[in-house]
């Protein structure tokens, strides 16, 4: 879901950038020192937060783009090779959403965490800003609830859920959103905020057999991701 600034009116763009900054800060605190990190998101990450993080975006054609190109439903990394994966607003009703979730569950390492973010479609923020962002990114008007079955069959269990961001009521451009004082367990007081976050952990039992992995030399890649197969133009840990 790649979104260009020129496609979004100024007020909506400012609200969207504030939301992304708040999400990025929360995610970086949660991820901590886990490396490497595979991070799929709508916008490039700031260079200061890039060490050990491979940041890609997903096009409307279902291709991952950035340092490599791969199909959203067939990632080039080995099973159980990445300790932390972020899917940040990249499956907002897209047809490749189930494939993204299934591949993230396959590639995630045992005891690793998957962070899945989507708009809260019941929030005032979404109806004021988010629906315009989603529409310009090609998301359908009706977005079905998240289906976690592709993750569960690969051993992922929901650890906790969280709401994050402004509610959209009285949220004037240029005014910072009010801090979330919830306890990160999807409390009722934190409901109707801009984004919902699901945090899933991969259990050690019940993992599927892994494909043979080829380690990437540290000199060639700063991400240290294990490659299972190559595909497309420049696929691999680059």
Image (cartoon, grey):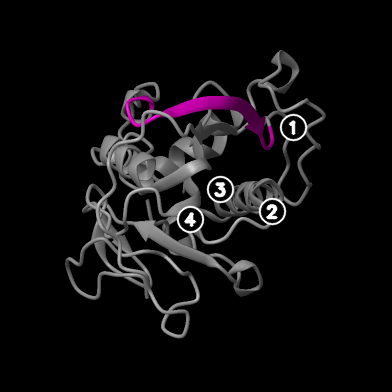
From this viewpoint, which residue is outermost toward the bottom? 219
Q: Name the residue under label 1.
A: 170
Tag 3 near tag 2, CB within 8 Å: no
Label 3 vs label 4: CA separation? 24 Å
**Measured from the top left, where is residue 47 in percent x and y?**
60, 74
User: Residue 32 has which mark?
Assistant: 2
In the image, which is nearer the foreground, mark 2 or mark 4? Answer: 2
User: Residue 150 has which mark?
Assistant: none
Magenta range is 152-166
Q: Is residue 150 above or below residue 87?
A: above
Tag 3 near tag 4, CB within 8 Å: no
Q: Mark 3 points at which residue?
A: 12
In the image, which is nearer the foreground, mark 1 or mark 4? Answer: 4
Label 1 vs label 4: CA separation? 32 Å
| Mark 2 crowdedness (10 Å alpha carbons): few <14, some 14-19, many ≥20 | few
The residue shown at (27%, 67%) is 69
- Quadrant assignment for the C terminus: bottom left
Label 3 vs label 2: CA separation? 30 Å
The residue shown at (47%, 79%) is 218
User: Residue 39 has which mark?
Assistant: 4
From this viewpoint, which residue is outermost toward the top? 188
N-term mark: 2 or 4: 2
In the displayed structure image, the side of residue 164 where residue 117 appears, left or right? left
Q: Is residue 131 above or below residue 8?
A: above
* Most common SS among magenta residues: strand
N-term mark: 3 or 2: 3
N-term mark: 1 or 4: 4
Q: Do we see residue 147 in this rendering?
A: no
């Amino acid at each position: 879901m790649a979104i260009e600034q020129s496609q979004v009116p100024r007020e909506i763009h400012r609200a969207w950038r504030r939301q992304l900054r708040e999400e990025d800060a929360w995610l970086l605190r949660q991820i901590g020192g886990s490396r490497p990190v595979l991070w799929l998101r709508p916008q490039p990450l700031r260079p200061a937060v890039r060490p050990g993080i491979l940041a890609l975006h997903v096009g409307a054609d279902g291709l991952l783009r950035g340092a490599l190109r791969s199909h959203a439903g067939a990632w080039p990394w080995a099973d159980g090779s990445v300790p932390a994966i972020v899917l940040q607003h990249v499956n907002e009703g897209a047809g490749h959403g189930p494939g993204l979730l299934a591949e993230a569950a396959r590639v995630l390492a045992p005891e690793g965490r998957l962070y899945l973010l989507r708009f809260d479609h019941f929030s005032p923020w979404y109806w004021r800003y988010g629906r315009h962002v989603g529409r310009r990114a090609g998301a359908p008007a009706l977005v079905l609830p998240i289906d976690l079955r592709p993750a569960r069959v690969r051993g992922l269990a929901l650890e906790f859920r969280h709401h994050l961001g402004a509610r959209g009521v009285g949220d004037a451009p240029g005014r910072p959103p009010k801090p979330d004082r919830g306890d990160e367990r999807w409390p009722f007081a934190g409901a109707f905020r801009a984004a919902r976050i699901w945090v899933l952990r991969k259990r050690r039992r019940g993992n599927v057999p892994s494909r043979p992995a080829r380690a990437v030399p540290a000199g060639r890649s700063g991400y240290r991701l294990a490659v299972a197969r190559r595909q497309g133009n420049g696929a691999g840990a680059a």
